Image (cartoon, rainbow, N blue to C red):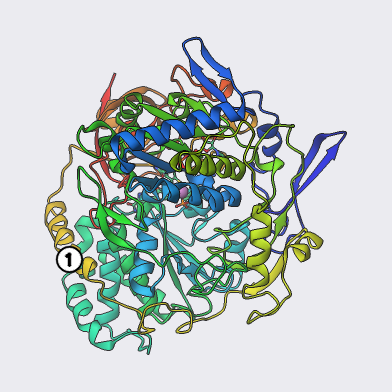
């Protein structure tokens, strides 16, 4: 979403800079922006479909690849039932509006229960709690970073990630502005991250223990009578929460969290007395055993301190294409939970998707409903989901696999066909999802920089053809020898949504928005700061916030059990966490040479005292072992990691035969997800629990 100024001379990009006239990103650009040039020019990038043969990959025509794919999916569903085909949509799907709009149609037509995506290794708990408490999975509270005076960040490292569920291009500058206006920001994280280093305060916390920390904050609120009254919830629900919080006083949670009672109490008081404040938790508190409880408690901290839906607190966007408005052109479902389960482990559905932690066992466990064919789109689950090696075993046993992707990587190499879409500079862009999570309401449309080579297809064109081919087969009709196209392109869908949306000609905030206006304003249009919108925008039937969702209440006994277990220390195990770096992007930008320069980033961070007690030195290769696997990795000894905790970044592990990524192979590293455990989940939401995996470390 950062505005880019791309200069092209004689068909070649001569410069990519931050766009100073972009009202949202204000000229900001991180190292990944300029790499769009190298992505576009990457000789490893596929442009035309390929088929796997005994003699390796061979290029085939689109019609051949699409017909073979449609036939295989059709026949497998006929033979084994609809659920025998599974789909996985990876993270870039939601950065690609064509893929989103047309990929969803394709998945729906498959009529399988086996839908998976990166949601269940990421933000599932946020969506689940928004669904339960506010009535819509996309009514996600966003920190009002530009106005807050006290920003409490748990398990997020925006200096590396550029913010998440808080789309914020120039986060460093905005956090500096926060400090300059007399505000404060505090980071709670088992690692003293780049964000924490610049913060007013950093607090180390034991991985997975955030729910206890948050309960202790609520405990102080109740003990000191700091709860702010509100018409937005039923006050009768307070008693239950007061009683719950009374069991977790700051002093009680000291041992399990590793945070001193004095610190917790002081943070609670500072939070409460600030002019406004916001508590925000991201990946580190979502992908852990109590991910959903953490998001529940974070919402309660914001609600009870009077900071929900208030300037400087946790607010809600009003994007130009609004997925929440029940009458909107592109409205999305409010959500659903546990209306069906995975076949083997009975994990709950959310939003008609199943947790990806179950994908490998659904492929490997024989019986009715077993997955026999797999469609991966814009994803690399062999590197990005827990116990990647087990998933790889599952992929090897499939009868058919197709990948919609432009790289032959750790996942797509197992496909029978790869259908490559155009890359970012060859198609237009409208951000359907990340405007919904942004710290300001803005809108922008980017036109393509280059015409794709003749014969290349966009993601949405691939999905359009594939959907139609499947329908033809189902109605017993022959498949055409030419591509099947549609007149309805993504931009016309957006045009309609803009015109009928909140800033369109009949909208509440009429700004006459349509696609032409956006084309005429290529830097983007500012639609103003986040504004209070409750109770109007609440989508619960009674227009109240629901403080006590029943499944949350039912999960509290699990939390209590863990509390008792963790009150006894286990000195023999290390707890593994992940990390991100500004110059990585999950698993897929490691083929860009400029992003890979400098020190090796795929290291095991370990505290000096832990390294000493194990007798291991700097950059020494050690063995790290978990229940599911072991890897060898060099150490990086640093007191910026909590004692007893070790950290490995995700997205590496490119030393596999069969991948076509020349640069990434040179910086292969190892995959943390060969250690993370598909059995380690947040049992309430089904989200993967990457944080706090017990590992042992051995000198080689
Ligand atoms: N241990 C651990 N594991 C994690 C995480 C963690 O913190 N720790 N983070 C998790 C999170 S938050 C996420 S989102 C996932 C991400 O994991 P995934 O979504 O599975 O995968 P990516 O690594 O983002 O790979 C994206 C793939 O999409 C392709 N691609 C890029 N752009 C496009 C496009 O426009 N169209 C198509 N068709 N393909 C495209 C790339 O070539 C690449 O193959 O990883 C998760 N895994
Ligand atoms: N450069 C870059 N930017 C990215 C990405 C990328 O791969 N590279 N990925 C994008 C994606 S898909 C996402 S979802 C976002 C994620 O955005 P963020 O959530 O900001 O990402 P991380 O940097 O992984 O920050 C997670 C932090 O949680 C901490 N942590 C781990 N376990 C715990 C715990 O139990 N408790 C607490 N309190 N903290 C814990 C980790 O030490 C880490 O600092 O980033 C996005 N932006
Ligand atoms: Mo993510």
**Of 19 and 661, the residue lying toward us:** 661
The image quadrant of residue 39 is top right
The residue located at (50%, 41%) in the rendering is: 472
Is residue 579 visible to the viewer in this orientation of the structure? no
Relative height, residue 59 to residue 497 (above, below) = above
Answer left or right for 490 relative to 560: right
* Residue 357 locus on image (x, y percent): 30, 42
Nearer to me, 159 or 224: 159
Q: Nearer the viewer, residue 259 or 411?
A: 411
For residue 167, say whether it is visible: yes
> Is 429 on the left-hand or right-hand side of 339?
right
Above or below 315: residue 599: above
Q: Residue at 57%, 62% (x, y): give it.
A: 175
Q: Viewed as shown, does residue 42 lie left or right of 583?
A: right
Q: Is residue 239 above or below residue 477?
A: below
From the top left corner, tell me how far across and down residue 612 is, in percent.
29, 31
In the rendered view, tell whether residue 122 sits above or below residue 516.
above
Question: Who's the residue at 53% across and 47% down the image?
Answer: 93
Q: Quadrant of the C terminus?
A: top left
Image mark count: 1
Q: Mark 1 sits on what residue?
A: 554
Say what secondary structure mark 1 lies in: helix
Identity of the residue furthest to the right in this view:
10
Nearer-the-camera pick, 234 or 573: 234
């Amino acid at each position: 979403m950062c505005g880019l100024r791309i200069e092209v001379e004689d068909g070649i990009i001569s410069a990519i800079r931050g766009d100073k006239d972009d009202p949202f990103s204000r000229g900001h650009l991180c190292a990944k922006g300029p790499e769009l040039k190298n992505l576009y020019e990457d000789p490893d990038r596929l442009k035309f479909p390929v088929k796997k043969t005994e003699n390796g990959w061979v290029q085939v025509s689109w019609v051949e690849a699409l017909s073979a794919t449609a036939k295989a999916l059709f026949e497998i569903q006929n033979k084994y039932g609809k659920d025998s085909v599974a789909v996985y949509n990876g993270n870039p799907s939601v950065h690609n509006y064509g893929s989103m709009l047309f990929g969803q149609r394709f998945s729906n037509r498959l009529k399988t229960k086996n839908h998976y995506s990166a949601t269940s290794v990421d933000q599932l708990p946020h969506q689940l709690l928004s669904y339960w408490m506010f009535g819509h999975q996309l009514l996600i509270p966003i920190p009002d970073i530009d106005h807050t005076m006290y920003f409490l960040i748990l398990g997020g490292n925006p200096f590396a990630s550029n913010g998440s569920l808080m789309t914020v291009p120039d986060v460093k500058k905005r956090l500096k502005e926060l400090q300059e206006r007399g505000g404060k920001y505090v980071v709670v994280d088992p690692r003293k991250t780049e964000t924490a280093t610049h913060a007013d305060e950093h607090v180390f916390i034991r991985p997975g223990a955030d729910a206890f920390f948050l309960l202790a904050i609520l405990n102080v609120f109740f003990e000191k009578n700091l709860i702010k009254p509100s018409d937005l919830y039923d006050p009768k629900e307070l008693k239950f929460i007061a009683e719950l919080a009374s069991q977790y006083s700051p002093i009680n949670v000291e041992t399990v969290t590793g945070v001193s009672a004095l610190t917790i109490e002081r943070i609670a008081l500072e939070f409460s007395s600030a002019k406004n404040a916001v508590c925000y938790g991201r990946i580190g508190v979502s992908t852990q055993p109590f991910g959903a409880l953490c998001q529940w408690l974070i919402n309660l901290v914001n609600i009870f301190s009077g900071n929900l839906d208030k300037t400087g607190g946790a607010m809600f966007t009003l994007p130009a294409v609004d997925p929440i408005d029940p009458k909107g052109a592109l409205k999305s479902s409010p959500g659903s939970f546990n209306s069906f389960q995975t076949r083997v482990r009975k994990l709950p559905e959310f939003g008609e998707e199943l947790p990806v932690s179950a994908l490998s066992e659904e492929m490997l466990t024989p019986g009715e409903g077993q997955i026999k064919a797999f469609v991966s789109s814009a994803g690399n689950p062999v590197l990005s989901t827990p116990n990647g090696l087990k998933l790889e075993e599952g992929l090897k046993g499939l009868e058919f696999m197709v990948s919609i992707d432009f790289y032959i990587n750790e996942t797509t190499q197992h496909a029978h066909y790869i259908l490559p879409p155009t890359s970012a500079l060859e198609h237009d862009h409208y951000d359907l999802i990340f405007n919904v999570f942004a710290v300001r309401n803005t809108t922008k449309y980017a036109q393509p920089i280059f015409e794709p080579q003749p014969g290349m297809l966009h993601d949405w064109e691939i999905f359009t053809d594939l959907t139609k081919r499947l329908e033809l087969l189902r109605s017993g009709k022959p498949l055409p020898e030419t591509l099947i196209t549609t007149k309805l392109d993504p931009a016309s869908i957006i045009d309609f949504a803009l015109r009928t949306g909140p800033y369109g000609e009949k909208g509440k905030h009429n700004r006459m928005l349509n696609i032409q206006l956006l084309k005429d304003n290529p830097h983007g249009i500012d639609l103003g700061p986040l504004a209070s919108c409750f109770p109007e925008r609440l989508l619960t039937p009674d227009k109240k916030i629901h403080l006590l969702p029943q499944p949350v209440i039912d999960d509290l006994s699990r939390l209590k059990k863990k509390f008792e277990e963790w009150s006894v220390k286990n000195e023999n195990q290390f707890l593994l966490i992940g990390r991100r770096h500004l110059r990585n992007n999950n698993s897929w930008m490691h083929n860009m040479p400029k992003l890979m320069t400098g020190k090796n980033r795929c290291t095991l961070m370990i505290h000096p005292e832990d390294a000493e007690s194990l007798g291991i030195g700097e950059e020494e290769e050690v063995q790290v072992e978990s229940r599911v696997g072991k890897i060898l990795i060099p150490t990086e000894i640093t007191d910026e990691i909590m004692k007893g905790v070790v950290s490995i970044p995700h997205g590496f592990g490119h030393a596999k035969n069969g991948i076509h990524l020349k640069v990434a192979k040179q910086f292969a590293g190892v995959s943390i997800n060969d250690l993370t455990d598909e059995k380690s989940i947040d049992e309430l939401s089904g989200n993967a629990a990457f944080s706090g995996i017990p590992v042992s470390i051995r000198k080689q």
